[in-house]
Image: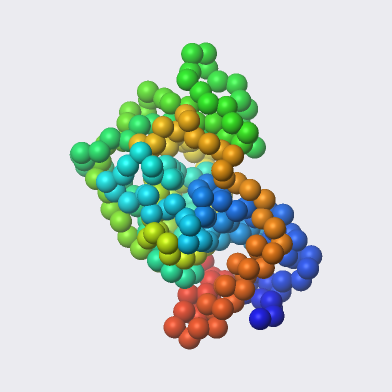
Amino acid sequence: MKLTSLPSFGPFTEERLEEIRAHSLTNCHAIGVDSLWFDSRTRMFITRPNHTLHLNYPPFTNEMSIAVHGHRCDVTLRTVYGEAFNVRPVFRPGTQRLDAYRYESPLRHGFDGAAGERRSDFGNGKFTAVSFPLPLQCEWAIHRIGRTTMWANDLHTVYVPRGTRAAWLVFEGDPDARYDPTCYSLARLEDFDFSSINHPMTTQELRNHLLVLLDWQMKPDTAPALQFAGR
């Protein structure tokens, strides 16, 4: 199949492919989840069959792969293909308690912390256990992503059924100065192994993803989902 274009993101010249590849990641945030960069405010997340997002279905276990988190800006999520689910807290009492951590990225934050904090220091990020905000203890709402808009301080994680492929776009708004880097998890994030995630994407890996997207675009029953030029 010849690479041509996808709505609003092509044509995929060699120069354009290299620009996308240079900003894209494999195992982005979690194993088996890749991130395609299209511009400074638009990414697409794509799961491979070995993804670990099936671990993010409540009631959670200590193996959950993506902590419950907010964002630096308002975001709109839009499904491209497959089934991905937004898992969000409903703020009424629940039986499961998630501990609070603060995440720091070396690209956006310094590594100097307050004295006495328990920290882990890995190559591309840190999680620090914090006593405030209090642990999150609530019930959960689960909905297909479809087309979802969230404020920067809305908390969520993402669930995809085990072994399935899915893709969804993330459109980012303006940065929110009130961004709170607190996230919540049952996993012991101070021991998180960052070496397993956020790897550079090869040109062939990028081409493989684009070929899958073009294949979905050509299917009559899925083509409308790929008309995502509008937000």
In this rendering, the answer to whether 75 lies above or below 134 is below
Q: Is residue 150 visible?
A: no
Report the residue at 71% width, 62% height from top.
203
In this rendering, the answer to whether 110 lies above or below 168 is above
Report the residue at 47% width, 20% height from top.
118
Quarter holding the N terminus is bottom right
Residue sitting nearer the eye, 228 or 83: 83
Report the residue at 59% width, 31% height from top.
122
Q: Residue 212: percent from the left, percent from the top?
A: 57, 72
Residue sitting nearer the eye, 170 or 210: 210
Q: Is residue 122 visible?
A: yes
Q: How many marks?
A: 0
Q: Residue 207: percent from the left, percent from the top?
A: 67, 68
Report the residue at 32% width, 35% height from top.
98
Q: Residue 59: percent from the left, percent from the top?
A: 27, 46
**Quadrant in which residue 146 is drawn:** bottom left
Q: Residue 137: percent from the left, percent from the top?
A: 27, 36
Left or right of residue 114, residue 110 in this image:
right
